[in-house]
Amino acid sequence: MFSFETSTYALGLMIAAAPTALFAVLGFSALIGRPLPERATSRLSTVTISIGLLACVAMLALMAAHGRAHVTVPLGNWIELPDSHYQFTVKLLFDYLSLPFVILTFLLCGTIGAFATRYMHREPGFNRFFTLFAMFLLGMTTSALAGTIETLFTGWELVGLSSALLVAFFHERSMPVRNGLHVWTIYRAADAAFLAAAIVMHHMTGHGDFDVLLGSGAWPGAVPADVSSTQALVVGLLLLFAAAGKSGLVPFSGWLPRAMEGPTPSSAVFYGALSVHLGAYLLLRVSALIGLSPALGWVIVAVGLVTAVYGALTARAQTDIKSALSFASVTQVGLIVAEIGMGWHWIALIHLIGHACLRTLQFVRAPNLLHDYHVMENAIGARFGPSASPAGSAPRLAHAWLYRLALERGYLDAWLIDYAARPVLLLFRWFDAVERRWTDFLSGGPSRESDRIQPSSGSLEEIV
């Protein structure tokens, strides 16, 4: 008879190994130029996701049977620097937050994987899609089960990379590639904030173990370490910035409809269900810190409510179904974040799971829904009436202003380009000019004309 520790360790390894094996097999076969047939890819995806899902359910049942609400599975120190006392520790954390989220991940990825085998049938990039899909599954699993800040950052990066590459999946066209770069730029800003928060956490506790920083008690009632309100506010604001970039909160909401350039299966499981909720999951994971700073809680509530109002207003002015669904997702994610700021952790978790399932089905149904609408319009010989005005019952004088604001998506992209991206771009161009003058001075002559970067006459969006 296996002990509880042995059983949980074996199940934890199985959960982590399932997406790792899927990504390793698909990635290696593509790397050597021998991609698997579609049928083999589909079966391998189904088997590995099913194994991971069953292992998660078994882990949850085992923890419930033994009355345990917090289980860790250490996988060792992968990097250790004796002089600086730094350790890169990989540890899996199973509790009533991570297990429901990872079960949701396997369940929705399995559903979309089965859908994608038919939707992407005979698509030239079939194997490339499933390789990136496996990378995303590995990143989501790693993020959900991370017991240290380093492990969470690793999964966070895998999710961001796979998401951006899938936005640019149809790379033979220019717009998917441009939008993929736009999404990647937003993700990099969010990752920088996440990395800064990780550095501050290391400075506060000496390492990034969540059991030390957030307390080893059962979520959400864990008692955090000796952290002051000011420290919690600083770390929380950095993590809120990271969550805003990943989940499309204001002012970063503009990237979400751009992500719809990818295939419908990736739109469904990434930007409608899982990836868009990863920022909210991060805030749920550090909810113990939020409880230490009332000011941080109110800031999170304000960001969530502003995002919800913005998403609800903008969604009513969209002319394509994917953009409307993406801004509807923004609305619900904003409400989830506001619930987290209010301290309603269980309500936020239930809301997250329900919304993810609903959006997955809506995105998968969207192409057929458009076809059905066209059939009905052809049958009645007329078009359906326009949807409700985004201004709703606002005064008549405000209708045009609100409609334009919603149609232009709050001008958020323009503000970010003009006041965030442009100054950075100009700064680095100035650095480049200074460097070239210095090298010209040292070399005793001007650089070759072909090596010089000519200023572009296009817009900043074209440059990016």
Image: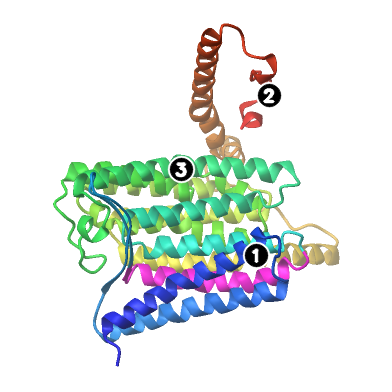
Q: Nearer the viewer, residue 407 or 75?
A: 75
Residue 458: numbered disc: 2
For mark 1, what is the residue? 29
- Of marks 2 and 1, the one in the foreground: 1
Q: Quadrant of the N terminus?
A: bottom left
Helix, strand or loop: magenta stretch: helix
Q: In the rendered view, would you say 220 is above or below 444?
A: below
N-term mark: 2 or 3: 3
Label 3: few (<14), some (14–19) or many (≥20) C-alpha neighbours in 10 Å: many
Label 1 crowd bin: few (<14), some (14–19), many (20+), radius 10 Å: some
Q: Position of residue 217 (x, y in %)?
A: 20, 67
User: What x and y, as percent, mark residue 382?
Assistant: 82, 58
- Residue at mark 2 to residue at mark 1: CA–CA distance: 41 Å
Distance from label 2 to label 3 (Cα)? 27 Å
Q: Position of residue 334 (x, y in %)?
A: 43, 52
Residue 205 seen from this side:
yes
Chain part drawn in magenta: 93-122
Residue 362 to residue 400: above or below:
below
Camera-near label (2 vs 3) is 2
Is 42 drawn above or below residue 237 in the view shown? below
Residue 138 among those drawn in magenta: no
